[in-house]
Image (cartoon, grey):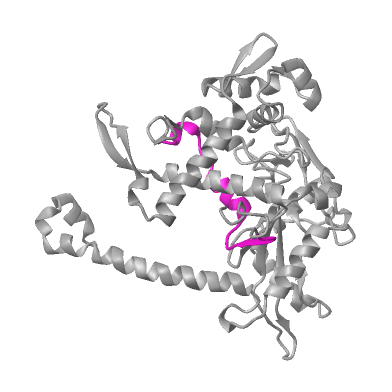
Amino acid sequence: YNVVTSSTLESPKLLMMDLSLSSLMASVAAEPNQVHLTGHYPYDRRTIDKADIAIAYAHPFNANLGIPGVKKFKIYSLIVAEFHLNGSQPIDIPRFLTKYGLSEKDISGAINYIERHGIVKREGKVLKALVDINASWEYVKSFFQNLCQRLFIEKDQSALIYNSPDENGVMRRRWLSPTDIKFLISVGIRALTEECWKRRVLLTGVVKDSNSKYLSRNYLGVAKHLNIYPELSTLQIHQLPWTDRIFLETLPLCDENLDVPWSSIEIDSAFMTLFLYQKEQSNPPYISGVKGTIVSNEKLFARSLAQFFLSRKKSTPLMGHVVFLDRLLYPEWDSKNLDHLVIETNELGKVSLFCCKDSSVPNIGQDIVMYFLSILTRNHFPEVIGYPDPLHKADWGAKSIGKKVKGLINSSEISFRANPLSKTFRTIRDSVRRL
């Protein structure tokens, strides 16, 4: 984040991360009530509160991409985004409903939610902001940068500790909880996303190992149901045993003309949480989200799978693993492929998705990402052949540091092992393996 927000001359044009961007953003989401540092961690003459956290989780915003969307899940983000765009000026509810094609019933729960967190107050047909939405987001980003500066640059471990009352109301020092850490990661990935849009930095995530089935199970199941590919309509498909990686690594064996670099079509990352569901055999299938309504951010990231090494010198092709790619969508490149696939149900509401159904659809963003990754994949390392060199070197560095840190952590237990009476009976008992 510091590199991207540096001066124009020093900021990068391509940023690669050794993780799935869409999966990371989905995995660190949490309710504001679960974040413990609210009201207790002092910074810049005040403390972070629940309104700040709810506003942060509503990001990222991009009006040109239609983010956030108008789906029923997390529709409060749409209201917060409207305040963000108009400088926290009051919102006329009937005009807002007309603008986005919503009903009063669609947003009543969202209004109640942000009222409970002290963000807005409803007065008749008008919503008034109780906080400065833009200032709150800037405060949270500054809080994130300050804490990370203390922790990672200054090596100040006290950044992980703050005072908080226990169940009896007594103030005690406590560590940041896992939920607190997730919130900070969530702020970081959202702020990074918006800065990459602002500075036109190509943000890409690469994962070499995954057992996901989002392409072969989720996307193709929905595509068959919507008749996007007529040739699928006659197929009788049951539970698929393979993962996406195993499925696509069989393609070079089936098609002798296939050469690297090649990639699957890009699908919207929202297909992580969209799939075809059939409750019982007697009931017709329908498109559902997680727990019926939960759908991750659409039109934000595009996912695909690609292969960068393939040799046919022997009877059995020698190939590198198919790797998973995530890239951030950009209005300049991807506006023509937005809203081509629209899913609308009573449970989900309206979900508009990024979609390039086959290779005949121009996709300059994917072309650029594939070009850069093919240049950066030099296959110098036989143990990870077909994987971008910079990420492999970064992985080596991280694992080397991990080994050193592991030794430090293990050595810190010597004093406890040397003085077993300092341990409780329960700790000693639980540390013994049982047959």
Q: Nearer the viewer, residue 326 or 72?
A: 326
Residue 135 point in image, percent of width and height: 58, 31
- For the point 77% across and 71% down, the residue is 262
In reply to whether residue 31 is colored magenta, the answer given is yes
- Residue farthest to the right, as pictured: 360
Residue 340 appears in which quarter of the rendering? top right
Looking at the rendered image, the quarter that the C terminus falls into is bottom left
Residue 300 point in image, percent of width and height: 70, 47
Q: Which residues are drawn in magenta? A: 12-37
Q: Is residue 311 shown left or right of residue 3?
A: right
Considering only vertical position in the picture, is 378 above or below 129? below
Residue 377 point in image, percent of width and height: 67, 75
Residue 249 appears in which quarter of the rendering? bottom right
Q: Nearer the viewer, residue 16 or 308?
A: 16
Residue 212 point in image, percent of width and height: 62, 58
Q: Is residue 410 shown left or right of residue 221?
A: left
